[in-house]
C-alpha cells in the first residue's frame, strides 16, 4: 500500500518538475560535452615487468636459492620503488624532460608577461621539482594481484613519447635495482675490509706473542731441553732480523731518493756499477749544458740528458726490485729459522706448564689465521659479487605505441555527466518544489504557515451543468471534495469553540483569502458557506473582493451594485436585505458584488460603514463568511483580516510560489491580533479518489453527483 502511494508521489513530482529536470539535465550535459571535447587527449602506454622473488647470485648454484618470500611482501615494495622519486629523477635526466614542452616547468606570471620583457630562466631546482611533479602525475605502477607482474604505465599527449616514457621508467627501475644491490654489496665489502685488517693485525700479534715468549724464556727453555744449540739458532735469527730491517730501511730511503730524482745520493747508497756509470754520464752532460751557448747544441744535450735520466730511473727501479727480492729471501730464511727453532723447542723436554703456555699461544695464532682466512675469502667473494649482480626484475613486454587516447574516455564521461545532470536536475527540482516552487503536501504547507496542521482539499472537476465546483457540496455530498469541506468546517468549529463560549451572541467571522489570484478562494468560500447552511446554521456569505468580484459567477446570478453603494453611502443593513441572494438549494444568503472595478477599494473595507456592516451581520447571523481579495496584489485583505476570527488561507497545489505565501503570511501576522486563528488549506491537491478511499476505508469515495 505505502509503496504504491510513494510511487505515485514520486511520479507526480517528476511530472510536475519535468521541464526543470530536463533543463538542468541538458545544461549539465551540454557543459560537460563542451568540457570533454575541449580536453587535451592523453595516450597511455604500459610496460609489463616480471619480479623475480629470489635474490639472484651467480656465485651460488641454482638449487641453493632457497624458498621465495611471500609475493605480497616483495612485490608491493617493488610497486613503490618503480615510481619512486629516484627512478623518476633518473628518467628526467636521461630523457632531458626539463627542457620538454609537456613536462618542463611552467613560466607562470612571467610567461604571461613575456611579451613585455624577456622572461628570466626558472630556478634549476624549482624547474626540476615541477618536472618531477608533472611526471609523477603521469606515471603509475600497479601489481596484477596474485602474480609477480607489474604494469608500469606512462601518459603523454604524444603516443610515441608515452611508449618511450613507459620503457624508460621500467629501465630506470631495473637499473636502480641493480645499483642498489651493488651498493649494498660494496658497503658490506667496506665493512668487512676493516675486519680483515683487524684480523691481520691479530695474526701478526699472535705470531709476535709466540716469538716474544721464546725471547723472554729462552734460558728456561734451554735449561729444560738441555739443547744449547737453541741459543745459536736464536742468535742467528736475531742477526737475520736486524739485517733484514736494516736492508728494508735502506731500501725505503733509496726509493724515496729515486722518486725525488736525487741521483747523486741514490748512486752512492746503491753502489751499483751500472748506476754509477750512468750518474757519471749525467754529470758530464750537465757540465756541458752549463758551458754550451748554442741553442741547437743545448737542445741535443737536453735530449741526451733526459735519456740518461730515464735509464737511471729504469736501472734504479730494477736494482731496488733486486734488493726487495733479497729482503724477501732473507725474510724467508728468517721464517724458516724461526720454524726450526719452534720445532726444536717443542721436540725437547719442556715442562708441562711451558708446553701449555706454548700450546695456548699456538692455538691463538691458529684461530687468528683461520679467522683471517675466512674474512679474506668473504671479502674477495663480495668483491666478485659486486661485479656479477643481476636485477631481480625484467621486462617481459615492452610498451608499444598506443593506437587510441586513454583520456578522456568520452562515452564514459558523457554517461557520468548524464547521470550527474539527472541527479542534479532532480535535486534542483526537489529544492525548488520544497523551498521555492509550489506546495505539494499539507505537511509542507503547515511548516511554512507555522501551524500544527494544514487541511487538504482534493482536486475536483466542475460538472458541465454546474456553475462552480462548490456545487459538489450539494450535488455530491459524499464526494471526497465535500468531505474535505466538512473537515474544514469541523476544524473551524473546534478552533472557535472558546470564542463562541465567550461571546455566544456574536457570530464568528470567517475570512477566506489567498496569496495570489486564481487560487480557488471564492470556490472555497462558497463551498464552506453552503456546508454551514446545510448543517442548519444561519449563514451569510459576503463577496468582499470589491476589485474583482466573482461570487455572482459561481452562483449563476447577475452582479449587483447594492453592496458597493451601501458601503459608499452608509445605509443601514435593513435597506439592502433586498440585495441579498438566497441559494435555493441550501438557503444560504449572499451579498454579491458588482463588476470589476478599476478604482481603489481599500477605503471601503477600512471605513466605518464596513465595520457597521460586519457588526450587523454578526448580530443577525450565526456564521459570516467573507470572500476577500488575494493578499499579494491587493491591500484590502489586511484591513479585513483584523476584523475576522478565522482566516482561511487558500493555497493552490503545486502552483503558488512559496515566496508569495510567506509574504502573505507576514502581511496577515502584521494585520491580525492574538484572537485571530489561521487555518491553511491546500486546494486542488492532486490525489486520486482510490487513494482517498484507501485512507478512509472506502467510506468517502467520489461517487459523483447525487441522484435526483
Image (spheres, rainbow, N blue to C red):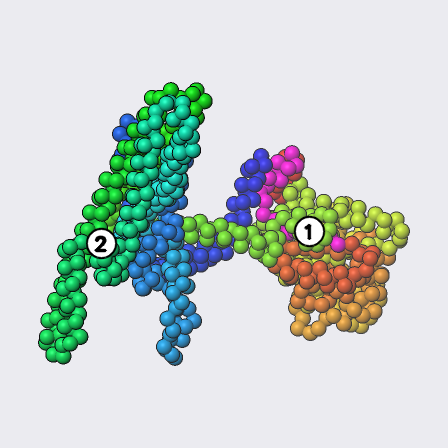
Residue at image coords 32%, 32%: 232
- Mark 2 and mark 1 lie on one chain; the one further toward the N terminus is 2
Q: Which residues are magenta?
A: 678-697
Number of labels in the image equals 2
Q: Residue at x 43, y 24 (%)?
A: 354
User: Looking at the picture, does residue 266 appear above or below residue 604?
Assistant: above
- Horizontal side, residue 406 vs residue 263: left or right: right
Q: Residues within 10 Å of mark 1 (few under 14, many from 20)?
A: few
- Which quarter of the figure is the N terminus placed in? top right
Residue 51, image x, y percentages = 32, 38
Would residue 428 be visible to someone looking at this image? yes
Examine the rendered structure and indicate whether residue 267 appears above or below residue 381: below
| The disc label shown at residue 447, or none | 1
Residue 297 shown in magenta: no
Q: Quadrant of residue 274?
A: bottom left
The stretch drawn in magenta includes residue 694: yes
Side of 603 where 474 appears, left or right: left
Residue 394 image offset from top left, x and y in percent: 27, 41
Amino acid at each position: 500500500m505505502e509503496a504504491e502511494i510513494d510511487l505515485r508521489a514520486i511520479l507526480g513530482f517528476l511530472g510536475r518538475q519535468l521541464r526543470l529536470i530536463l533543463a538542468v539535465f541538458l545544461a549539465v550535459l551540454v557543459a560537460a560535452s563542451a568540457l570533454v571535447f575541449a580536453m587535451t587527449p592523453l595516450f597511455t602506454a604500459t610496460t609489463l615487468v616480471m619480479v623475480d622473488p629470489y635474490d639472484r647470485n651467480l656465485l651460488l648454484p641454482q638449487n641453493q636459492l632457497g624458498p621465495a618470500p611471500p609475493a605480497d611482501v616483495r612485490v608491493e615494495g617493488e610497486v613503490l620503488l618503480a615510481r619512486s622519486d629516484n627512478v623518476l629523477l633518473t628518467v628526467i635526466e636521461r630523457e632531458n624532460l626539463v627542457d620538454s614542452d609537456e613536462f618542463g616547468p611552467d613560466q607562470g606570471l612571467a610567461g604571461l608577461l613575456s611579451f613585455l620583457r624577456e622572461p628570466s630562466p626558472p630556478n634549476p631546482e624549482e624547474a626540476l621539482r615541477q618536472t618531477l611533479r608533472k611526471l609523477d602525475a603521469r606515471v603509475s605502477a600497479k601489481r596484477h594481484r596474485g602474480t609477480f607482474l607489474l604494469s608500469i604505465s606512462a601518459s603523454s599527449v604524444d603516443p610515441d613519447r608515452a611508449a618511450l616514457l613507459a620503457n624508460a621508467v621500467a629501465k630506470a627501475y631495473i637499473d636502480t635495482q641493480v645499483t642498489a644491490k651493488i651498493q649494498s654489496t660494496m658497503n658490506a665489502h667496506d665493512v668487512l675490509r676493516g675486519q680483515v685488517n683487524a684480523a691481520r693485525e691479530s695474526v701478526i700479534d699472535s705470531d709476535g706473542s709466540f716469538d716474544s715468549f721464546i725471547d723472554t724464556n729462552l734460558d728456561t727453555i734451554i735449561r729444560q731441553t738441555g739443547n744449547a744449540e737453541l741459543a745459536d739458532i736464536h742468535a742467528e735469527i736475531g742477526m737475520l732480523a736486524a739485517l733484514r730491517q736494516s736492508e728494508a730501511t735502506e731500501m725505503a730511503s733509496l726509493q724515496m731518493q729515486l722518486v725525488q730524482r736525487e741521483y747523486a745520493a741514490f748512486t752512492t747508497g746503491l753502489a751499483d756499477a751500472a748506476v754509477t756509470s750512468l750518474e757519471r754520464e749525467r754529470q758530464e752532460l750537465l757540465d756541458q749544458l752549463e758551458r754550451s751557448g748554442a741553442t741547437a747544441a743545448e737542445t741535443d744535450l737536453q735530449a741526451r740528458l733526459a735519456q740518461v735520466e730515464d735509464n737511471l730511473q729504469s736501472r734504479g727501479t730494477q736494482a731496488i726490485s733486486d734488493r726487495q727480492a733479497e729482503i724477501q729471501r732473507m725474510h724467508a730464511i728468517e721464517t724458516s729459522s724461526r720454524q726450526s727453532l719452534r720445532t726444536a723447542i717443542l721436540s725437547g723436554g719442556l715442562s708441562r706448564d711451558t708446553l701449555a703456555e706454548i700450546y695456548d699461544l699456538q692455538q691463538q695464532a691458529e684461530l687468528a689465521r683461520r679467522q683471517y682466512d675466512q674474512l679474506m675469502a668473504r671479502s674477495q667473494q663480495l668483491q666478485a659479487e659486486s661485479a656479477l649482480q643481476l636485477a631481480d626484475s625484467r621486462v617481459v613486454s615492452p610498451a608499444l605505441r598506443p593506437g587510441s587516447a586513454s583520456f578522456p574516455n568520452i562515452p564514459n564521461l558523457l554517461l557520468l555527466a548524464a547521470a550527474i545532470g539527472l541527479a542534479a536536475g532532480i535535486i534542483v527540482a526537489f529544492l525548488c518544489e520544497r523551498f521555492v516552487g509550489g506546495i505539494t503536501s499539507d505537511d509542507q504547507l503547515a511548516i511554512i504557515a507555522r501551524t500544527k496542521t494544514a487541511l487538504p482539499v482534493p482536486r475536483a472537476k466542475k460538472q458541465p451543468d454546474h456553475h462552480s465546483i462548490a456545487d459538489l457540496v450539494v450535488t455530491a455530498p459524499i464526494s471526497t471534495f465535500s468531505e474535505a469541506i466538512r473537515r474544514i468546517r469541523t476544524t473551524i468549529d473546534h478552533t472557535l469553540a472558546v470564542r463562541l463560549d465567550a461571546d455566544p451572541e456574536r457570530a464568528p467571522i470567517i475570512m477566506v483569502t489567498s496569496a495570489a489570484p486564481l487560487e480557488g478562494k471564492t470556490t472555497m468560500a462558497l463551498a464552506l458557506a453552503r456546508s454551514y447552511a446545510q448543517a442548519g446554521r444561519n449563514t451569510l456569505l459576503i463577496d468582499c473582493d470589491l476589485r474583482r468580484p466573482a461570487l455572482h459567477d459561481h452562483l449563476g446570478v447577475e452582479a449587483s451594485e447594492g453592496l458597493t453603494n451601501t458601503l459608499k453611502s452608509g445605509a443601514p443593513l435593513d435597506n439592502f436585505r433586498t440585495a441579498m441572494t438566497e441559494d435555493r438549494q441550501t438557503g444560504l444568503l449572499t451579498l454579491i458584488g458588482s463588476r470589476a472595478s478599476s478604482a481603489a477599494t481599500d477605503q471601503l473595507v477600512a471605513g466605518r460603514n464596513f465595520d457597521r456592516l460586519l457588526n450587523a451581520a454578526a448580530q443577525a447571523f450565526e456564521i459570516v463568511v467573507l470572500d476577500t481579495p488575494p493578499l499579494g496584489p491587493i491591500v484590502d485583505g489586511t484591513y479585513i483580516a483584523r476584523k475576522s476570527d478565522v482566516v482561511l488561507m487558500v493555497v493552490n497545489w503545486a502552483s503558488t510560489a512559496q515566496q508569495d505565501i510567506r509574504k502573505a503570511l507576514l502581511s496577515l501576522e502584521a494585520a491580525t491580533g492574538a484572537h485571530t486563528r489561521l487555518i491553511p488549506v491546500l486546494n486542488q491537491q492532486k490525489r486520486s479518489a482510490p487513494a482517498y478511499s484507501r485512507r478512509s476505508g472506502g467510506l468517502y469515495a467520489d461517487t459523483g453527483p447525487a441522484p435526483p
